[in-house]
């Protein structure tokens, strides 16, 4: 069974199961503590969730909220959700500009559900930048988060009216994307006060619609603290529940799904139900890949590399190749899957690096024509050695993966590859990543236990810490490392 069929079938199956559950639950927003188990076929989504037990958990409070959400959208379709006097209040996650990458925007779904549940509001999502989210991901069935196109003021070019709407956190003076301000795990943190404020206001004072852009994934420990307070045992972020939530919200749009189908077919990934592959991501344009204060000029001299692409020459070329080489060496240290050489899907924010690693170093003519590159101490020679025994596969990277936060103003199709790579990485048995959260986000959705980091951020790195016994100690800054962290 091919990868794209697995993605489609699993998404449909989870959607159907959730809808069946919704018909039996109480249509109230609650903070329950019961975990409801969704039964899944033994043969389904082996490489998507690695759920060997065949059970995918969803906490009862999420099941109940989704059921209520579904009923509200059924009772108040289209414009009536915003206009009918009996319609419920609404909470909209918005993006009006700098909202971060995919993990920043979509990795906070558990906190979004928590906020919507605690405030008794229908959760919706609306992107104004870089393009409407529906160009890339659409509602999968169990929860319809989209805003009808007929509703004025919510289109791609309507940032002014959206910005004027009241905000969930406006009364608390929260800078929504500053984790140090948002993530206090004490009982009276700002998020809790914002929830109480929203619940205290009536429609005339506070409005039916509240917006927010809170980076909830930076506050995982805070959410987990709240859940434990309410007797929950599923902390969501480190269990299969996170992936179930993601699939309950999203499936690829038609053009993105077609791109996924075309890519995995051409690359020969998931040709049979027994074949597996790994995925390796090199984020070489990220500012935190370099020492603090080092600004790498991009292909357009007026802007940094993260905005206009990494020039594949000189020191930048050497840095990118060395990064990929270290990552490949870490991949080589992973536990093997049987006797077969497992394919490695190589992805990067530098299309030049993808071409070099997956094409040029596998091309004997290129090696012979550029023999001066390959001496005993060169980065090229080390890279050549690293790829020799690896079955590397990659998309034809003619253009770079456009960063949805740094490279705005492009046509929707120019962002498709960013979502395609995410879904292919979601199907990997093992995920190897470095700077940024993009590939680790894919591993979080799939819930694979085979995850490896080959480096950490040069500055400002914030990582989750525990006491070794499952007790979360919050977040701490960690210095950059250059070793395989499995």
Image: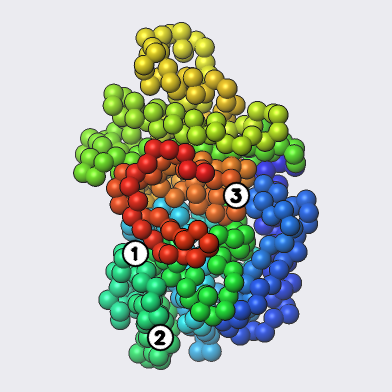
Circle 2 sits on which residue?
A: 196
Q: What element carries label 3?
A: loop
The image quarter containing residue 78 is bottom right
| Real-space Cα separation, disc 1 to disc 2, in angstroms | 20 Å
Secondary structure under tag 1 reads helix
Discs 3/2, front = 3
Q: In this view, does 438 lie above or below 334?
A: below
Disc 1 packing (10 Å; few <14; some 14–19; many ≥20): some
Q: Would you call the spot at circle 3 few (<14 residues within 10 Å), some (14-19), or many (20 or more)?
A: some
| Residue 183 place in picture, x, y as percent | 37, 69
* Residue drawn at x 75%, y 39% as measured from the top left: 274
Q: Quadrant of the N terminus?
A: top right
Mark 1 or mark 2, which is nearer to you? 1
Q: Are marks 1 and 2 in contact (CB under 8 Å)?
A: no
Pointer 1 residue: 179
Q: How is the image coloured?
A: rainbow
Mark 1 or 3: the one toward you: 3
The image quadrant of residue 10 is: bottom right
Residue with the mark numbered 3: 449
Between the residue at mark 1 and the residue at mark 3, the CA separation in whole angstroms equals: 27 Å
């Amino acid at each position: 069974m091919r990868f794209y069929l697995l993605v489609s079938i699993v998404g449909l199956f989870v959607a159907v199961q959730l809808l069946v559950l919704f018909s039996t639950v109480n249509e109230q927003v609650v903070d329950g503590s019961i975990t409801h188990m969704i039964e899944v076929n033994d043969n389904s989504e082996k490489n998507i969730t690695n759920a060997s037990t065949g059970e995918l958990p969803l906490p009862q409070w999420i099941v109940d909220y989704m059921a209520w959400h579904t009923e509200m959208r059924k009772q108040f379709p289209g414009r009536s959700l915003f206009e009918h006097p009996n319609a419920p209040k609404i909470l909209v996650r918005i993006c009006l500009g700098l909202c971060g990458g995919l993990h920043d925007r979509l990795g906070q779904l558990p906190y979004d559900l928590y906020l919507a549940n605690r405030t008794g509001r229908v959760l919706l999502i609306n992107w104004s930048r870089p393009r409407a989210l529906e160009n890339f991901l659409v509602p999968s069935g169990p929860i319809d988060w989209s805003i009808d196109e007929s509703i004025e003021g919510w289109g791609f070019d309507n940032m002014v009216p959206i910005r004027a709407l009241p905000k969930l956190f406006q009364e608390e003076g929260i800078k929504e994307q500053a984790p140090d301000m948002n993530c206090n795990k004490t009982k009276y943190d700002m998020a809790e006060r914002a929830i109480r404020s929203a619940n205290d206001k009536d429609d005339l004072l506070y409005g039916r619609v509240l917006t927010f852009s809170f980076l909830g994934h930076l506050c995982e420990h805070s959410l987990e603290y709240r859940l434990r307070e309410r007797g929950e045992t599923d902390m969501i972020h480190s269990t299969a529940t996170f992936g179930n939530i993601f699939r309950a919200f999203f499936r690829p749009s038609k053009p993105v799904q077609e791109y996924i189908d075309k890519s995995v077919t051409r690359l020969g990934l998931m040709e049979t139900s027994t074949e597996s592959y790994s995925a390796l991501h090199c984020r070489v344009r990220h500012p935190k890949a370099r020492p603090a204060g080092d600004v790498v000029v991009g292909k357009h001299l007026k802007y940094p590399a993260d905005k206009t692409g990494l020039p594949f020459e000189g020191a930048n070329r050497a840095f990118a190749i060395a990064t990929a080489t270290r990552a490949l060496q870490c991949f080589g240290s992973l536990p093997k899957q049987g006797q077969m050489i497992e394919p490695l899907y190589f992805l990067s924010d530098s299309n030049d690096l993808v071409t070099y690693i997956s094409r040029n170093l596998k091309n004997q003519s290129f090696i012979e024509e550029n023999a001066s590159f390959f001496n005993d101490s060169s980065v090229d020679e080390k890279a050549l050695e690293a790829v020799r025994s690896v079955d590397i596969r990659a998309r034809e990277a003619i253009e770079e993966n456009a960063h949805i936060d740094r490279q705005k103003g492009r046509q929707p199709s120019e962002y498709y590859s960013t979502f395609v790579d995410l879904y292919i990485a979601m199907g990997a048995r093992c995920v190897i990543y470095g700077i940024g959260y993009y590939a680790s986000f894919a591993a979080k959705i799939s819930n694979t236990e085979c995850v490896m980091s080959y480096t950490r951020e040069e500055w400002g790195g914030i990582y989750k810490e525990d006491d070794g016994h499952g007790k979360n100690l919050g977040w701490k800054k960690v210095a950059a490392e250059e070793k395989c962290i499995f």
